[in-house]
Amino acid sequence: MPIETDQGERWISISGVQFFGGTVYAFRDVTEVRHLEELKADFIATASHELRTPLAAVYGAAQTLLRHDFALDEAGRDRFISLIAEESERLGRIVNEILLANQLEAGRVDLGSEPFDPVELVERVVEAARVHAPAGISLKRRTPEDVPFVSADRDKVRQVLVNLIENAIKYSPDGGRIEVGLESGQGSGEETVVFFVKDQGLGIPDEEQARIFEKFYRLDPQMTRGVGGTGLGLYICSELVNRMGGHIWVESIEGQGSTFLLELPAEPTSAARPSPILARPSEGDPADAQRQ
Ligand code: ADP
């Protein structure tokens, strides 16, 4: 049964065992269990919807090709085949998200830690995102020159950035500017690198800002704005970032956009990255080149 407390509603389960002298009651607070069950039910509904939409598109396109192949010109056929390819890719991504969330929970994800150049990573991620960005979205890069190398799993950091940019696009239904960039930071005395993805989209109310990193949590599960998702993306991002020794958070004003920030440890031995006129460390000491 639900009871009202100063801290809000709690759900209590009560069981009783009768003895000769009376009855012993056990009270158990099942609020968290109930909450998880609700989230799971929401997740099943959203995941089924998310899977059904691309599946219906693939099925429809394949059926059209089978039945009307003769009536379609080459451009028409290409359109349906591209649609099948795109939607199957989307299906694959959703399934991968679900699998990865499961593996993270079971502690079965291995993370590497090779120092890498964050400026180059941001450049690549932004370029790739521009290819798919819808017409109303502009993507800008803000990378200073003097950022140190990052000590983390490059591919996983790329995955997190891609996810944050996808969200920035998804939750800017009226278009706008998205900035992806870097800053040097200082976390508990150690040098760090802060990546950020800033949008001008829907924004997130203060009281929801911590919860969006929870598994399955979505601000708009009924999809009143027509934006779908599994609610796993940010959970995966925060798990990956935490395991790389960093942290992720959001700063946002509802209705005015959000900035997602992720802070990772800098490579301890790396000084500021070399200026463009000097060779990179892997290319040898520039003084050597002069001596030769
Ligand atoms: P999904 O996008 O699949 O729902 P996520 O875990 O990526 O799941 O995000 C959880 C929720 O956080 C989203 O449903 C959305 O409500 C909110 N959210 C995430 N990114 C943004 C953003 N850039 N702007 C506004 N809301 C966001």
Image (cartoon, rainbow, N blue to C red):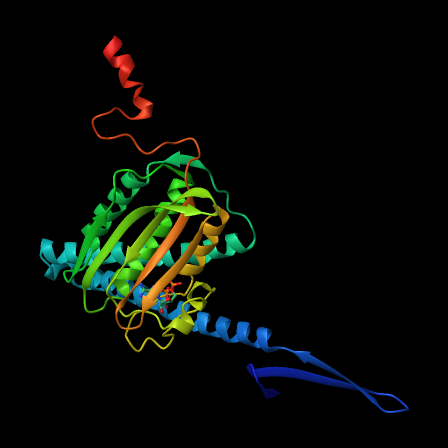
- Residue 31 image point, x, y percent: 59, 77
Quadrant in which the C terminus appears: top left
Q: Is residue 67 left or right of residue 186?
A: left
Residue found at x 70% / y 85%:
14
Residue 88 in view? no
Quadrant position of ligand 1: bottom left
Q: Nearer the viewer, residue 129 or 176?
A: 176
Q: Is residue 169 left or right of residue 159?
A: left
Q: Nearer the viewer, residue 64 or 132?
A: 132
Residue 282 sits in which quadrant? top left
Residue found at x 25% / y 13%:
289
- Residue 34 image point, x, y percent: 57, 77
- Residue 126 image point, x, y percent: 24, 48
Residue 184 sits in which quadrant? top left
Residue 3 in view? yes
Q: Is residue 127 left or right of residue 106?
A: left
Note whether 33 is above or below 189 in the view shown: below
